[in-house]
Image (cartoon, rainbow, N blue to C red):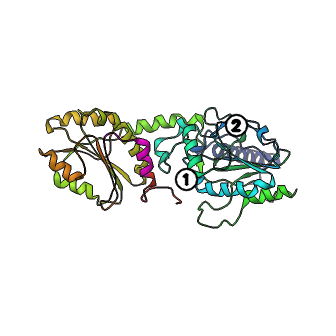
């Protein structure tokens, strides 16, 4: 049946409007679906923008501003941090880049954008230190940084103006301090491999020769920025860990021998303690923190209570309060001297006592008395079964 022309035009307009509305709604839906990891990200500085000024303290005790680098022909601002394995992978390359271009009037400055309180404990599994200012000092010394390393984790004022997406993220400015490049250092994270595209070096070379930068913007790959707005993530993690079940099983001498032999593929920390031992109780939270930090990487905390069996209930309540969801045992034997021999013949009997055992039973750390958490963290991290992704 033929329809009047006016009817057909109206129908077409209605269909067109419907399709447009559907497309708009779909577009809006897609644009508002944001990865939670990047929900609080800030806009990245656009090419051609003037370098935002800053006033930040460096690990050397000096305060740096944009004017501190006024003589530089090219200024390279790198947002990086301690804990991120990708940042760690680029440390030596940044040191080399700084050295290679120093005589050519190029200055490199690194800024840590992360708020330490927004960093979850289990995000520290690939590092021996966190992202606090004091820990930045340690990393700078250990790694031999030859460039200023600045802390912006308290207010993130500078970081929000530059808008790094991940660590590391490079911003390169010409003599006029206008942004000419932002993105990755190169296209290969693994330092054992040869990059195909030296993007940061290409940009620097072009600027030194008064040439346009060949590629002004690239994507970056690494760890998300720990913005202050993410601080509640640590609270969410604590709630999750609090829900994990806590158990307390019995163990005899044969079982202890098996634990020490460590017939697993995990690096195992064995801690002997008792509810009546004050140093044991005081250090226990540090042990739980170490477990939360490294357990996703093949680390295991095993605790053995030396309390009398009549105190099993008391020991269990303590473990629940400490949220010790790793394997927990209470020794069932009466002879504590046989226990000492089974654990480690070198143990003199004082509590607490801690052993770090590699797969196959090799003891790489043994300590009587309260642990030095910082020292033990470094020993765990430096063990061949752990360490950086890229050695």
Q: Is residue 130 above or below residue 220?
A: above
Return the disc, 2 or 1, that comes first in the chain's sequence: 1
Give the extent of the magenta segment.
365-380
From the image, which quarter does the N terminus lie in? Answer: bottom right
Q: Which residue is mark 1?
A: 85
| Disc number for residue 286 | none
Provide residue 242's location: percent of width, then percent of height: 37, 36
Q: Residue furthest right?
A: 210
Q: Is residue 122 above or below residue 206?
A: above
Compared across the picture, whether 256 is left or right of 44 comes to left
Provide residue 364's location: percent of width, then percent of height: 35, 55
Front residue of 265/230: it is 265
Q: What's the CA distance linking mark 2 and mark 1?
A: 23 Å
Provide residue 191's location: percent of width, then percent of height: 60, 62
Residue 216 visible in rendering: no
Q: Residue furthest left?
A: 334
Residue found at x 80% / y 52%: 105
| Disc number for residue 158 | 2
Provide residue 56's location: percent of width, then percent of height: 68, 35
For numbered disc 1, what is the local secondary structure?
helix
């Amino acid at each position: 049946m033929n329809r009047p022309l006016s009817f057909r035009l109206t129908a077409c307009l209605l269909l067109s409007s419907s399709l447009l509305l559907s497309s708009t709604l779909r577009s809006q839906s897609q644009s508002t679906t944001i990865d939670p990891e990047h929900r609080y990200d800030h806009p990245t500085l656009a090419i051609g923008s003037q370098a935002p000024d800053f006033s930040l303290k460096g690990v050397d005790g000096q305060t740096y501003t944009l004017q501190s680098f006024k003589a530089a022909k090219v200024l390279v601002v790198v947002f990086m941090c301690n804990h991120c394995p990708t940042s760690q992978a680029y440390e030596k390359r940044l040191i080399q880049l700084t050295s290679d271009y120093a005589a050519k009037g190029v200055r490199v400055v690194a800024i840590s954008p992360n708020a330490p309180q927004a960093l979850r404990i289990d995000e520290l599994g690939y590092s021996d230190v966190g992202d606090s200012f004091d820990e930045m000092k340690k990393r700078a010394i250990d790694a031999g940084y030859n460039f200023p390393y600045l802390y912006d984790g308290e207010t993130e004022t500078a970081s929000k103006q530059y808008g790094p997406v991940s660590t590391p993220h490079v911003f390169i400015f010409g003599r006029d301090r206008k942004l000419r490049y932002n993105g990755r250092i190169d296209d290969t994270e693994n330092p054992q491999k040869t990059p195909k595209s030296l993007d940061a070096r290409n940009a620097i070379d072009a600027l030194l020769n008064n040439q346009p930068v060949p590629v002004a913007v690239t994507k970056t790959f690494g760890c998300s920025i720990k913005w202050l707005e993410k601080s509640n993530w640590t609270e969410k993690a604590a709630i999750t860990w609090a829900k994990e079940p806590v158990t307390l099983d019995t163990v005899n001498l044969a079982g202890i021998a098996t634990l020490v032999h460590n017939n697993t593929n995990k690096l195992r920390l064995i801690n002997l303690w008792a509810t009546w031992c004050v140093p044991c109780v005081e250090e226990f939270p540090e042990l739980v923190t170490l477990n939360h930090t490294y357990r996703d990487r093949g680390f295991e905390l095993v605790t053995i209570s030396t309390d009398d069996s009549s105190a099993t209930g008391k020991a269990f309540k303590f473990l629940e309060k400490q949220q010790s969801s790793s394997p927990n045992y209470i020794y069932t034997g009466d002879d504590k001297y046989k226990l000492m021999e089974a654990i480690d013949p070198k143990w003199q009997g004082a509590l607490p006592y801690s052993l770090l055992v590699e797969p196959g039973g090799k003891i790489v750390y043994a300590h009587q008395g309260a642990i030095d958490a910082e020292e033990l963290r470094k020993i765990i991290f430096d063990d061949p079964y752990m360490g950086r992704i890229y050695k």
